Image (cartoon, helix red, strand yellow):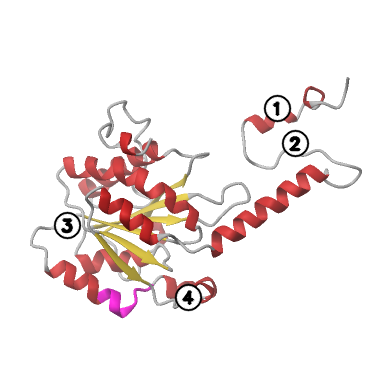
Amino acid sequence: MTGGRDDDPWAVLKDFTDARVAQGRTGTSLPTRELLAFTQAHAAARDAVHDVADFAGLRAALEALGETVLDVRSRAPDRATYLRRPDLGRTLHPESVTVLANGHAARAEPLYIAVIVADGLSAGALAQVVPVLSALLPALRSSGFGVAPITLAMQARVALGDGVALALGARLALVLIGERPGLSSPDSLGAYLTYGPQPVTPDSARNCVSNIRPAGLDARTAAWRLHHLILAALRRELSGVALKDESGDPPPDFAPQALPRHP
């Protein structure tokens, strides 16, 4: 019998990647199976961009972990404007600046880290936020660093986190954001950390841990890498191209008390 997987020497490559390889052909075109899969993936990517993030559910999950949560929004009034005007997504709405300033004034102890959760370009990616933070935050606090209330940012891009950190008086901004969907990854979460954010911070001053999703970088490993990078950034007072990820694999005992909450 011929025509099966064993007859195609390229088919084995599918075991190593979600990329569209070894698709075969029918005449001069793609096989119908692959064409339908491509169409489905494209629709999933478009849905990820336009879906509304479930911030209410995320707030409830974070508060169940004992976290204090703040809500802010960018200057983009709606999703359509957000997609057309990236500059508005990078800027805090004036009302949100006031909310953050009041929260900062009410705290006496110094804050090292501001955590911002932004919808970005994939609402579904926010499903990874709680597994990451439930492992990361206990580790940061056990290292002696004060963490600001978690800020949920609607219609936001990475640079909006700089304004949040400045308003809260934090030394480092950690932004968890839905990444631009790929055709094989509509649910990917990115984590950007910036030491000493400024009103205009170059991207070269940021570190990024990306592709956090079930089929990519798992939440526990992502939390470990972020823990390593954040401690190094605070110790060396820098981030970006001068700060390298030398974390390696997480040890078996990293944040074991937090992980069972989200198996």
Badge 1 marks a residue whose secondary structure is helix
Q: Residue at x 48, y 58 (%)?
A: 123
Horizontally, residue 125 falls left or right of residue 257, namely right
Asked if labels 2 and 1 touch by Cβ distance under 8 angstroms, the answer is yes
Mark 2 — residue?
Answer: 22
**Amino acid type, residue under disc 1 in the picture:** Val
Q: Residues within 10 Å of mark 2 (few under 14, many from 20)?
A: some
Q: Residue at x 28, y 31 (%)?
A: 256
Q: How far apart, in angstroms, are the residues tagged by discs 1 and 2?
A: 8 Å
Mark 3 — residue?
Answer: 111
Q: How far apart, in angstroms, are the residues tagged by discs 4 and 2?
A: 41 Å
Q: Quarter of the image for the N terminus: give it.
A: top right
Q: How far apart, in angstroms, are the residues tagged by discs 2 and 3?
A: 51 Å
Residue 238 appears in view: no
Whichever of labels 4 and 2 marks the residue nearer the N terminus, that label is 2
Whichever of labels 3 and 1 marks the residue nearer the N terminus, that label is 1
Whichever of labels 3 and 4 marks the residue nearer the N terminus, that label is 4
Q: How far apart, in angstroms, are the residues tagged by discs 4 and 1?
A: 45 Å
Residue 256 appears in view: yes
Instruction: Look at the image and give the residue range highlighted in magenta.
Output: 91-97
Q: Residues within 10 Å of mark 1 (few under 14, many from 20)?
A: few
Mark 1 — residue?
Answer: 12
Q: Residue at x 36, y 61 (%)?
A: 56
